[in-house]
Image (spheres, helix red, strand yellow):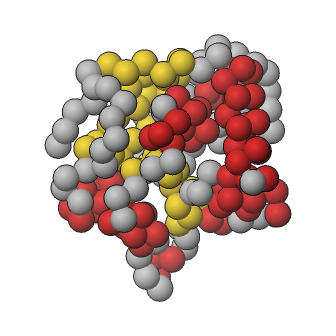
């Protein structure tokens, strides 16, 4: 109950503060297995993309996030796990197992994912090199549709090193294609 209230407050607040708009170009929001692959410039990215999805799709779409960052402190842990039901990956698990195993489990259960293939936040101007995670997820679930997402201006809203900078209009662009 508390998580649902916080979720509604956060999603509404994010839309009001940023003016975020999702533009579906080349595809429509549909209830199907998808991996939304987005550029990563801000901690707001997953939230803005997730809130741009229609409400029924949000319930079946989970952001993939780094556990070493999001499990620090009770508030972060509550927000990422209870409010947004994120798939948490352990970036240091490569030595002892597959760090993407939770993402494999989620997609095997038919849940769509919000994934940042660069693996870390960039500068908002250029796209960094992709890590191989999406490739491995698609090998496991070739029926998943990849939806490339370009998030523009989020780095101005919450740049690296700042908690919150200022409200700014933000655009999200989506282009769809199936592999």
- Report the front residue among 29 and 150: 29
Image coordinates for residue 158, horizontal then vertical, percent: 71, 32
Query: Is 23 drawn above or below residue 120 in the view shown?
Result: above
Q: Residue at x 53, y 66 (%)?
A: 89
- Report the front residue among 30 and 167: 30
Q: Residue at x 48, y 22 (%)?
A: 22
Total labels drawn: 0
Query: Is 22 drawn above or below residue 56 in the view shown?
Result: above
Query: Is 175 drawn above or below residue 93 in the view shown?
Result: above
Q: Residue at x 45, y 40 (%)?
A: 57
Image coordinates for residue 149, horizontal then vertical, percent: 40, 32
In the drawing, does residue 41 fall left or right of residue 168? left
Residue 49 in view (yes/no) = no
Image coordinates for residue 37, horizontal then vertical, percent: 39, 41
- Report the front residue among 115 and 118: 115
Q: Residue at x 43, y 18 (%)?
A: 23
Query: Is 93 drawn above or below residue 100 in the view shown?
Result: below
- Report the front residue among 90 and 144: 144
In the figure, residue 47 lies in which quadrant?
top right
Position of the N terminus by quadrant: bottom right
Residue extending furthest toward the bottom: 96
Image coordinates for residue 101, horizontal then vertical, percent: 42, 72
Position of the C terminus by quadrant: top left
Residue 50 in view (yes/no) = yes
In the figure, residue 75 lies in which quadrant?
bottom right
């Amino acid at each position: 109950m508390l998580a649902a209230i916080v979720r509604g407050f956060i999603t509404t607040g994010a839309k009001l503060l940023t003016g975020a708009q999702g533009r579906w170009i080349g595809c429509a929001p549909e209830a199907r297995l998808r991996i939304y692959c987005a550029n990563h410039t801000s901690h707001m990215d997953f939230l803005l993309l997730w809130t741009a999805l229609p409400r029924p799709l949000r319930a079946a779409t989970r952001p993939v996030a780094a556990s070493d960052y999001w499990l620090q402190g009770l508030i972060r842990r509550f927000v990422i796990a209870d409010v947004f039901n994120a798939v948490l990956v352990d970036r240091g698990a490569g030595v002892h197992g597959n760090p993407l195993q939770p993402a494999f489990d989620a997609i095997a259960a038919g849940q769509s994912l919000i994934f940042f293939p660069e693996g870390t936040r960039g500068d908002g101007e250029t796209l960094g090199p992709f890590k191989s995670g999406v490739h491995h997820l698609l090998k496991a679930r070739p029926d998943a549709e990849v939806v490339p997402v370009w998030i523009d201006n989020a780095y101005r809203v919450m740049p690296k090193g700042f908690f919150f900078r200022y409200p700014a209009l933000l655009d999200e662009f989506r282009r769809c294609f199936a592999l």
